[in-house]
Amino acid sequence: MYKTDDKRLYIYLSVIIALAIPALLINLGLQTFINDESIRALVALEMGFSDNFIVPTVNGSYYYSKPPMYNWIIYISFMLFGRFDELATRVPTVVCLALFCYTIYKVNRPYFKDIKYPILISLFFLTCGRIIFWDSFRGLIDIGFSWVVFLMFIAVYHYGTRKKYWHMYIISYVLASIAYLLKGLPAFVFVGCTMMAFHYMDKSLKKIISIPHIAGGLCMVTILGGYYMMYGVYNESTSVVPGLLDQSTQRTPLRHGIWRTIKHIFIYPFDNIFHFLPWSVLGVMFLRRDIWNIIKRNRYIHYVSICFLANIFVYWISPGTYPRYILMLIPLIFTVLVYLYSIEEEGWRLLLLRRLYQVIIVAVPFVVAGLIGIDEVKQIDGYQWKIGVLFLALVGLAVIYFKDQGYRLFFLVMLVLLLRIGFNWFMMPIRQEKDFGTIAKNQAAVIGKKYKNVKLELYKNAKLDHTSSFYIARERGVINYRNLAPDEDDIYLIVDTSRTEIPIHYEVVDTFRKREDWTLMYVVKRKQ
């Protein structure tokens, strides 16, 4: 196995790790939850309050959209931090991202002679736009789920190419079971498409009907069947499957119609080029007539390509998909792009990339320096020295970029991490200040504290958004249950007048705005 004696690689990698830590952690818990985060946090909170970690609930009602495993992870984080908040909810995302990046490096290491390239694949994933400027600071399922699915992709190839079909099917289906418990039905789509892609490439389609495959399927049935046996002890409802199906089909052509689907098919590639900048521009490497022949020469790259194409298809025809739904596929396409880059001879493609990245490395320091004239930035403590530090670091990076051209891509990774640190320092506080969700959070917290020691419940079909519900429940230390027919004198009710009227003989004692649609909610109590 090739090992580099170039100490510069390890120095630069150490700098990148040193930058990644503050980039991922500064102000991680600052911003108010977005709705999807608050669902995860609320379900985990209610599991702790009810001491039931098998059946997810939201406001005391059964929650069918997702299985519970990621909520377990969040609750463990709550316990480790000793508090229920944004930071504790988001740290598991950072941990999963770090493990994901390390996995990307380890699985690609045997297939590249030069250690720089598997490292770059991992770093490209970490610093692509969608990860570094969005998903890495959100307490969502997708990075953890994508990591498990990616492991399944690799297990299929690793054991399949060695004809260890028992290992391949059993390990792959165990990983698919874990993925299902994290997010639900998409796990089945990924394992099915991946198995078909591998056997097609391997010309071993007959193996799909085999004893090892049956054994793998039985492992999945055992794991998931065991969970649902425990689930049935608490809830015998038949709404589980419809709930999961509803969640999984919301983004598909079934819900959006033919014309929106056609439009999505055309714009989807360009959307992804944008979301996964700056590394998606390496796609210029595909612009050659013999590209498929080049890919097929390397068995691993061939598999990675087919696996990507087989799994992206479902999302390519689904208009409502978000970029985070395909995070497990991004290391696959980056692997192909880095491989093509590694074997590229001097030509117009490399020249184009060099010119583009030169413009970026030179222009960015001046863009950052321009922040000093923005009024919102001036409201941030220490804005002058923060801009100064970033500017000097970026200028130094630009100088080194032109002196040590063998590590240009590593310097660009450093640039992205410095930009994320600047994003943490400036954009996060500005967004937090302007986000009306922060106002809703503060109002919900006030309600929770004020009615902490009394009985407070949702009235009939009142729709309280998950973010407001989380902050109220957290402050009160109990679940926000629903009451259809209140008959107690000392009960307080939360009423949503857009859905039902305030009950007679009750008077308004408080109001607050919920985040979801800024509806005014009323706290009422029986008249004395």
Image (spheres, rainbow, N blue to C red):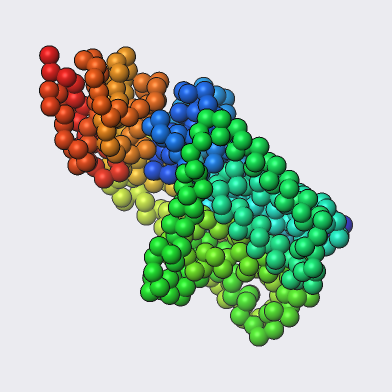
Locate residue 266 relative to residue 198 in the image: left or right. Answer: left
User: How many circles with numbers are drawn on the protein?
Assistant: 0
Residue depicted at x 66% and y 57%: 191
Name the residue rendered at 20%, 31% in the picture: 522
Pinpoint residue 277: horizontal percent, then vertical percent. Answer: 52, 62
Q: In which quarter of the image is the N terminus?
A: bottom right
> Residue 93 lies in what quarter of the image?
top right
Q: Quadrant of residue 168?
A: bottom right
Residue 261, image x and y in percent? Answer: 43, 71
User: Relative to residue 435, is residue 147 drawn left or right?
Assistant: right
Image quadrant in which you'd find residue 335: bottom right
Q: Residue at x 25, y 26 (%)?
A: 485
- Closest to the observer: 482 or 366? 482
Residue 509 visible within the image: no
Q: Where is residue 410 in the image (x, y as percent from the top left)?
A: 64, 57
Q: Is residue 48 rendered to the left or right of residue 373? A: right
Is residue 465 depicted above or below 423 in this figure? above
Above or below, comparing residue 456 to residue 314 in the picture: above
Residue drawn at x 28%, y 37% as measured from the top left? 461
* Nearest to the observer: residue 363 or residue 302: 302
Quarter of the rendering occupied by the C terminus:
top left
**Location of residue 369 in the rendering, given as x and y in whole percent from the top left corner:** 41, 53
Depth check, front residue: 211 or 456: 211
Name the residue nearer the viewer: 462 or 476: 462
